[in-house]
Amino acid sequence: MHTTKEMPKTDHRENITESVERGKALWEDNNCIGCHTLIGEGAYFAPELGNVFYRRGAGNHETFKAFMNGWMKAQPLRIPGRRQMPQFNLNDQEIDDLADFLKFTAEMDVNSWPPNIEG
Ligand code: HEC
C-alpha cells in the first residue's frame, strides 16, 4: 500500500515522453540488460547504467546525447584486455531515444543507488 502510494513521487513518471518510451523499447529489443545492470538489476558483465547520465554526461542532456552518439558508433573499441560491447548499428534518432531513456532512469529517486558515480 505504502509503495503504491509513494511510487508516483519517486519514479517521476510525469517525465515519460514518447522518446523515453521508444528508448525503453530499444533497450529491451537489443537486450542491453543481457550485459548491463540498470538500478542494480541485470547482468554483471558491463557497467551499471542507472547513473551513466551523470557519469558520462555530467547531468547535462546535450552533453550526454553527444557522449551516447559517439559511444554507440565507436563500438566495438577492440582495446586488448578490455571487455567488448557490440555494434548495434542504431541511427541518430534511436541513440537519442536511448539517451532519453537513460536520462529518465537516472532522474528517478532510487535512494541514491548505485552508491558511487562509477556504478
Ligand atoms: C555483449 C555485452 C553488451 C551489450 C549487449 C551491451 N553492452 Fe554496453 N557495454 C558493454 C561493455 C563491455 C562496456 C564497457 C566497455 C569499455 O569500457 O570499454 C559497455 C559500456 C557501455 C556504455 C558506457 C558506460 C560507461 O560507464 O562509460 C554505455 C552507455 C552502454 N554500454 C550502453 C549500452 C546500450 C544502450 C546497450 C543496448 C543497446 C548496450 N550497452 C548493450 C557490453 C555490452
Image (cartoon, helix red, strand yellow):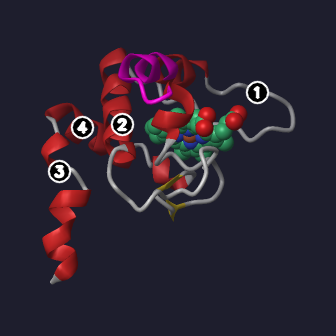
Disc 4 C-beta below 8 A from ligand 1: no
* Real-space CA distance between mark 3 and mark 1, rounded to the nearest whole angstrom: 38 Å
* Real-space CA distance between mark 4 and mark 2, rounded to the nearest whole angstrom: 9 Å
* Real-space CA distance between mark 3 and mark 2, rounded to the nearest whole angstrom: 13 Å
Give residue 80's quadrant in the image: top right
Residue with the mark numbered 4: 20
Q: Position of residue 96 (x, y in %)?
A: 34, 23
First along the sequence among labels 3 and 1: 3
Give residue 20's quadrant in the image: top left
Front-most of 89 and 9? Answer: 9
* Real-space CA distance between mark 1 and mark 4, rounded to the nearest whole angstrom: 30 Å
First along the sequence among labels 3 and 2: 3
Disc 1 C-beta below 8 A from ligand 1: no
* Real-space CA distance between mark 1 and mark 2, rounded to the nearest whole angstrom: 27 Å
The residue under the point 25% across, 58% down is: 10
The residue under the point 36% across, 33% down is: 98
Which amino acid, by three-letter code, is at mark 4? Val
* Real-space CA distance between mark 3 and mark 4, rounded to the nearest whole angstrom: 11 Å
Q: Quick one: SS at disc 2?
A: helix
Of all residues shown, which one is farthest toward the right? 81
Q: Give the magenta range.
A: 58-67
Badge 2, how many Cα within 10 Å: few under 14, some, many 20+?
many
First along the sequence among labels 3 and 4: 3
Q: Position of residue 26 (x, y in %)?
A: 33, 39
Q: Quick one: SS at disc 4?
A: helix
Mark on residue 110? none
Badge 1, how many Cα within 10 Å: few under 14, some, many 20+?
few
Image height check: is 33 above or below 100?
below
Which amino acid, by three-letter code, is at mark 3? Arg
Mark on residue 13? 3
Majority secondary structure of magenta residues: helix
